[in-house]
Amino acid sequence: MSGQTPEIPIEHQLRELAPQVLGVITRRFRDFALAEDAVQEAMLAAFRQWPREGIPDIPRAWLIRVANRRMTDMIRSAMARRERETVMTREQEPAIGPAEEIEADMDPEDTLLLLFMCCHPALSNSSAIALTLRAVGGLTTAEIANAFMVPEATMAQRISRAKQSIKTSGVPFALPTPEQRRERQPAVLHVLYLIFSEGYSGSAGEQSQRLDLAQEAIRLTRSARALLAEDAEVAGLLALMLLTDARRRARTGPNGELIPLDKQERSLWNQAEIAEGTALLSFALTKGSVGLYQLQAAIAAVHDEAASAEDTDWPQILALYELLQRVSPGPMVTLNHAIAVAMVNGPARGLERLKPLDRDERLSGHYRLDAVRGHLFEMQGDFPKAVEHYRTAASKTTSLPEQDYLLIQAARLERKTSNLL
């Protein structure tokens, strides 16, 4: 044990290491459900012991050793309960040597392969995505529920059913073939997109950004592109992440307060990421078919190319959103399309485009709908209605930085209103 206090909180280290350890244990034992239980117990053991005894010199190897031991115990126990004649002997266990040997056995793609494995043919796309966000992304059930816009209890049941479906399907939970990887690719890309989105803009809690999640999503997407180098949508997704992440340093102030895109200091934007994202997008667009992530990356690129907010080519963004609505319609696309309409044709037209979303159960109670209405009413000069919607949005969001930002906007307009009286 090193015995030193880590610079990074233990819970953050464990969250980052969990999917890596789960990937190793699943690869060795080919049983996801048991592996997840074993890794969870290893995490709990670390959470109890590390603050008292110190962080191990090689934390990941420590966790793998403990999870491997627990996995072996569970398999032996299960075999005994079934009264089998053969038992697992020490010679049959996957070899666990010194920590350095454990690290040497690590496959850098274990986490990526675990992601593909979670997109199991026994599961619907939504269930596969939810399960993978738990196993690979390390998101809580509440965070996943927020991403899917469903109650937390509903998501907990969905994840539980997903595990049970895998167990009863008879389809082995094993490394997918190259053909299976392509079949599962849409669900995998959706998972990576959601992990990045949660990392770039946290949906709950005190942090507006979770750099570990965003960076892990980018790393995994790079690995996916190495496996599928000619695929335009993989390149498009990586481009989208880089073009969005390029603005990360500018989107929060010194006290963690949110700074909207039109107020950001653009000199803080990461030009290397913008250049790489633009090159990836150019490659993707040469492949012919244009997909969801390529279009979103193209919109991000238009924002990044503008020298100032006033220079933003909103007509081009509007045209891209209209194409996106045809390729992948959905409530969030409609919401962002309404903003583009307002920027090109005026706030009244944008507000009109929002009305159908009041009947969409996926978004009707979401804070973003009220936040956008507040913004458009402010553009229109109707400050009382803008204040009302900003405050309603603040009451709905579970992100404290978002809540603070919305309340500040409401207070600012209230002061402006009182000065006009």
Image: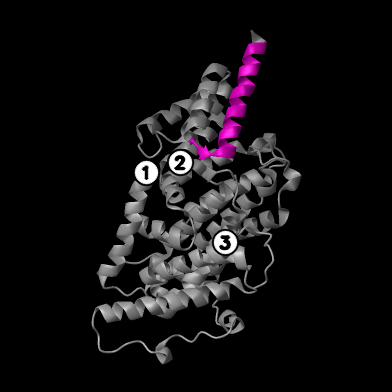
Tag 2 secondary structure? helix
Residue 341 image point, x, y percent? 52, 32
Tag 1 secondary structure? loop
Residue 58, quarter of the rendered image: bottom right
- The circle drawn on residue 151 is 1
Instruction: Please identify, in this view, whether the residue under mark 2 or under mark 1 is nearer the observer.
Output: 1
Pick the residue in front: 194 or 239: 194
Are the residues at dot 3 and dot 1 in contact (C-beta closer than 8 Å)? Answer: no
Instruction: Rate crowding at label 3 as few (under 14), some (14 to 19) or many (20 or more) other CA atoms within 10 Å.
Output: some
Q: Residue at image x 60%, y 62%?
A: 51
Q: Residue at image x 41%, y 48%?
A: 145
Residue 25, quarter of the rendered image: bottom left
Query: Amino acid type of disc 2?
Result: Met
Instruction: Rate crowding at label 2 as few (under 14), some (14 to 19) or many (20 or more) other CA atoms within 10 Å.
Output: some
Residue 75 image point, x, y percent? 35, 78
Label 2, label 3: how many angstroms apart (C-alpha)? 24 Å
Is 221 colored magenta in this rendering?
no
Residue located farthest toward the front when viewing the structure as drawn: 52
Q: Residue at image x 63%, y 37%?
A: 260
Q: Is residue 185 above or below residue 101?
A: above
Which residue is tagged 3? Answer: 216
